[in-house]
Image (spheres, grey):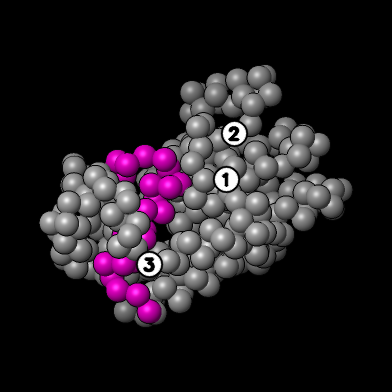
Amino acid sequence: MAKPCSAEGMLIMTSLKASGRRPANELLQKLSSADFALISPYLEPFDGAADRILHNAGEQVDTVHFPCGLSLAAFVVAIDDDREVEATLVGREGAVGGIVSHGFLPAFSRITVRFAGPFVRLSVARLEGEKRQSRTLADLFSRYADCLLAQLLQATACNATHSIEQRAAKSIVAAVERTGDLLLPLTHERLGMMLGVGRSYATRVIQTLKTEQLVETRRSALFVKDLTGLQNKACSCDTAVKQHFARVMNGLYGKRSSS
């Protein structure tokens, strides 16, 4: 489970509260001032290390986690040949845990920190209590739950119809858009999990992208040399998700942040 925030993280959160600034999570930033004031006293920061488990499958979900800044969380699903497949990524545009099910049901998948960084978390019971007090707060989270479901449905369709290369380009572009960084802590193993393939297959895909001058490999990382080229190579699935976010949430997904 998530470790408590470091002294530095607590100092950052104290500074944010004192200055009136919000954590670098776009869902929290989209709340009205009144709605943010309802939950802000109960937001707890912590440092999310890569591969740290936020919820295991089967556990009761009692906490909502909000990735901030460059952090990314992943829904990871076990399949019957002892492999695990990443269903989707969630970054600073959203939240994981207790969003769709309201936290009163066990988690179906594992939720794992994929890219390390800061998070804030909130008790599901507290969020549900404040949603009962504010219709606008409840509405915003309901609309986000709809968008998250759309993201998962589109990922299912993408995995069934598009090539590994298209999906790899899409996943790398999505990570860049969420983090705002062209240097991604993305290993061959991690890309393989994102795509549902073995390390050797992921290595071949990366080599293809390198040959096409789209990416470079760095130590335990991937550097995007040609973002436009990757966007052209990717399937249109993330575009469809962004369009849904635009209609339902007035943007949010894939929006660059200066935070």
Horizontal side of 224 relative to 49 (left or right) equals: left
Q: Which amino acid type corresponds to the residue marked 3 in the rendered image? A: Cys
Mark found first going from the N terminus, 2 or 1: 2
The kind of secondary structure element at disc 3 is loop
Q: Which residue is mark 1?
A: 66
Q: Quadrant of residue 183 in the image?
A: top left
- Whether residue 123 is visible to the viewer of this picture, yes or no, is yes
- Whether residue 222 is visible to the viewer of this picture, yes or no, is no
User: Residue 153 in the image: x percent, y percent?
Assistant: 53, 72
Identify the residue shown where x is 16% and y is 57%.
212
Q: Which amino acid type corresponds to the residue marked 1 in the rendered image? A: Phe
Q: Which residue is mark 2?
A: 23
Identify the residue shown where x is 56% and y is 35%.
24
Is 151 in front, or is 76? 151
Mark found first going from the N terminus, 3 or 1: 1
Horizontal side of 156 relative to 198 (left or right) equals: right
Cα distance, mark 2 to mark 1? 9 Å
Direction right: furthest residue: 133
Q: Which residues are magenta?
A: 161-185
| Marks 2 & 1, CB-CB < 8 Å contact | yes
Q: Which residue is mark 3?
A: 235
> What is the chief secondary structure element of the magenta stretch?
helix
The kind of secondary structure element at disc 2 is loop
